[in-house]
Image: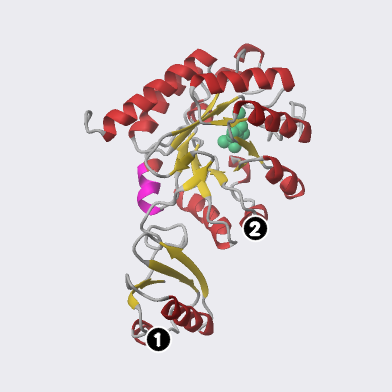
Amino acid sequence: MVVVMQAGASEEQLLQVEDRLHHDGFKVHLSRGANRIIIGAIGNTEQVDRRALEALPGVEKIISITRPFKLASREFQPENTIIQIGDHCLGDGSLIMIAGPCAVEGREKYLQAAWAVKKAGADLLRGGAFKPRTSPYSFQGLGEEGLKIMAEARELTGLPIVTELMDQKSLDMVVEYADIVQIGARNMQNFLLLKDLGSINKPVLLKRGMSATIEEWLMAAEYILMSGNPQVILCERGIRTFETYTRNTLDLSAVPLVKELSHLPVLVDPSHGTGKRELVAPMAMAAAACGADGLIIEMHPHPEEAWSDGPQSLVPEQLSHLIKHCQGLRRSLQAGEVI
Ligand code: PEP
Ligand code: MN
């Protein structure tokens, strides 16, 4: 349940409510909004004396959270979570562009890609140093060497970096280098890993599992939130269906739906969502139109030579066009020029 404090409630009144909730066996999460404080109380609501709680000084009302995901729900936090990364904000209505190659393949190649990403006008740089490959014989990533190359690219271009964490043993290392820690589709329900992400102070980009329902995805986010990290970014990257012409089926209906259910920012990955270069720009435009908070796009200076995901990687000029058009569309929509 959620305890909504009155607009002018004092810190002392807040403390009194928190004490009472702790005493009744609840775990308490504070959310300080622009106008009022909301207390999320997780525990057994059946035993609680709601009327006594509501009568405490400073309490405006008590709302029950009906969704199984509590901290992730809009009922718990009506305003959007806004996550600051460098000069950029995710969740404030802007469209954040993340781009880069699927994998870090080497220093020279990555720095060339990073400069192309910067020139195309992207805000953040992506790249995989630990790659979750279907075949154990495929390139598995450069590991820490790849992270060091990414850090150098950040230093040179000023672009914050997004990279995937695959397991608990490399958590400290990845967290040290990354500005945003990505959890891939294959790890969305690695609950022990999700719990460990609660104690890091970096944002987590949580991709939707390839056969995860929206509720399962939000419950995965809940693991990170309830473990203490409020900076969770969701990412729709396509789900597996009977369709074979595309790598996955990009579920864009998930974007407005999740934004209604949850206060967390939602990104779209049309690269893994389609698997086809020619479908990336149209789906990116659709994502910009349906309210996504950002896009994550694969780009490679020479896709035909890429060690992974070449067929879905844009060339730099295509990325540059995509960014221009998506930002233009978003601005027109926000200005009410397009309906
Ligand atoms: C990736 O972003 O490189 C990746 C492997 O994505 P996903 O987990 O969505 O397949
Ligand atoms: Mn990839």
Q: Is residue 296 left or right of residue 7?
A: right
State the residue in front, 137 or 48. Answer: 48
Q: In the image, what residue occupies the spot 60% across and 61% down?
A: 227
Q: Residues within 10 Å of mark 1 (few under 14, many from 20)?
A: few
Q: Which residue is mark 2?
A: 199
- Locate residue 304, reporting x and y percent: 62, 12
Report which quarter residue 68 is drawn in: bottom left
- Locate residue 14, reporting x and y percent: 44, 77
- Locate residue 30, reporting x and y percent: 47, 67
Q: Is residue 98 visible?
A: yes
Dominant secondary structure of the residues highlighted in magenta in the image? helix
Q: Residues within 10 Å of mark 2 (few under 14, many from 20)?
A: few
State the residue in front, 219 or 175. Answer: 175
Q: Which residue is mark 1?
A: 49
- Say what amino acid the circle numbered 2 marks: Ser
User: Which numbered tag is attached to residue 302?
Assistant: none
Ligand 1 image position (quadrant):
top right
Disc 1 from disc 2: Cα separation: 33 Å
Identify the secondary structure beneath mark 2.
helix
- Locate residue 228, reporting x and y percent: 58, 61
Sequence-wise, which precedes: disc 1 or disc 2?
1
The C terminus appears in which quarter of the rendering? Answer: top left
**Is residue 115 part of the magenta span, yes or no?**
no
- Say what amino acid the circle numbered 1 marks: Asp
User: Magenta stretch?
Assistant: 256-262
| Viewer-nearest of discs 1 and 2 | 2
